[in-house]
Amino acid sequence: MTSEAVGAPRAASIPRAFGIDKRYLAPILVTIVLIAGQVSFAFLESWSRTFLAIATAIGVEMLLGRLFAGQWPHLASAYVSGISVGMLVRSPVFWPYALCSAISIVSKYVIRVDGRHIWNPSNLGIVAMLVLASDTVASLSVQWGNTLLPMVTVWCFGIVILRSLGRLHITLTYVASFVAFAALRSAVTGHAFLAEVAPITGPMYQLFIFFMITDPKTTVHGTRAQCLVAFLVAAVEAALRLLQFVHAPYYALFAVGPAANLIEIYVKRRAAARHGG
């Protein structure tokens, strides 16, 4: 979930929740995910790799924000992207963490249509690394296992924060769709239903459902449209899982999210043209 775009409004006009600038809610939640996962399973490759991802994201954001907008950008978005990369990327070497963060942030400034982001930054960066450096890079896949407390903690904070941001319906739609498609996959493959549902209990999915698919800068507008896109992401992911794609959720969002954004942009252009005519 990114929280700032080029030319963002002044801090004084930013809404607040719980007495906190709303731009800080996503960084707070992603930090909770990191702490819960690390304390429970020590799931990071190393703290140094994660710090490298965060530092790169912040550094590139500051540079490009200054170059493109002529001002220092708010860094909450960069922190979320960097920490997400630091948790989700798995590699024995350091450079993929820096490169993935750099790709993620650069995409925010370069890949834009009508002033809008098309891809979720960290989703694009991770997919790029999985495709271009598959011999060096993998993705986090560990589950919480039988220890439900970390996941319950993350969900409690996540529900409160997403509700305050007005984006909880996206996560709930995706989760409900994932569970329904898990039942369908179980019927098709003969695998146990719980085995098909299990992936959504992992730290990777907490980042996916609370940040990537709810990113306000890369989701369509309107509650119904957002719920439809969340459902479609889950549907494409289910199909990819049946085809044995290991990184199905990333690829599903990579395909569905931009397509939905481009369709919405096209519809708005047509409506503007008719109105202007």
Image (cartoon, rainbow, N blue to C red):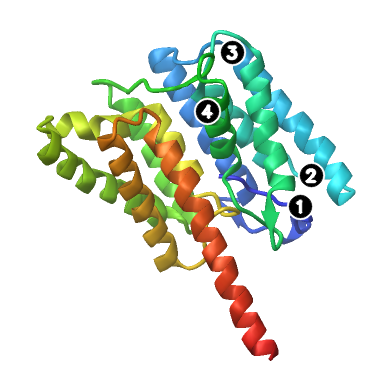
User: What residue lies at 65% left-to-right and 36% top-to-bottom?
Assistant: 104
Cβ atoms at labels 4 and 2 below 8 Å apart: no
Question: What residue appears at the point 61 percent right and 35 percent down from the top-left corner?
Answer: 81
147 and 19: which is toward the camera: 147
Q: What element carries label 4?
A: helix
| Residue 170, placed above or below residue 106 | below
CA distance separating discs 3 and 4 = 25 Å
The residue identified by callout 4 is 131
Q: Do the residues labelled 4 and 1 touch (CB within 8 Å)?
A: no
Sooner in the amino-acid sequence: mark 3 or mark 4: 3
The residues bearing labels 4 and 2 have C-alpha atoms spaced at a distance of: 30 Å
The N terminus - image quarter: top right
Disc nearer the start of the sequence (4/1) = 1
Nearer-the-camera pick, 250 or 155: 250
Q: Nearer the viewer, mark 3 or mark 4?
A: 4
Of the two numbered discs 2 and 1 in the rendering, the one whose residue sits closer to the viewer = 1
Looking at the rendered image, the disc whose residue lies closer to the viewer, 4 or 2, is 4
Which mark is drawn over residue 73? Answer: 2
Q: Quickly name the residue at label 3.
A: 47
Q: Give whichever of discs 4 and 2 has the lower sequence position.
A: 2
| C-alpha separation, residue under disc 1 versus residue under disc 3 | 30 Å
Judging by the rendered image, the residue that carries numbered circle 1 is: 6
Amino acid on which disc 2 is placed: Pro
**Mark 1 nearby-residue class (10 Å; few <14, some 14–19, many ≥20):** some
- Residue 177 in the image: state x and y as whole percent: 27, 50
Residue at disc 3, secondary structure? helix
Whether pointer 2 and pointer 1 mark residues with C-beta atoms closer than 8 Å, the reply is yes
Mark 2–mark 3 contact, CB under 8 Å? no
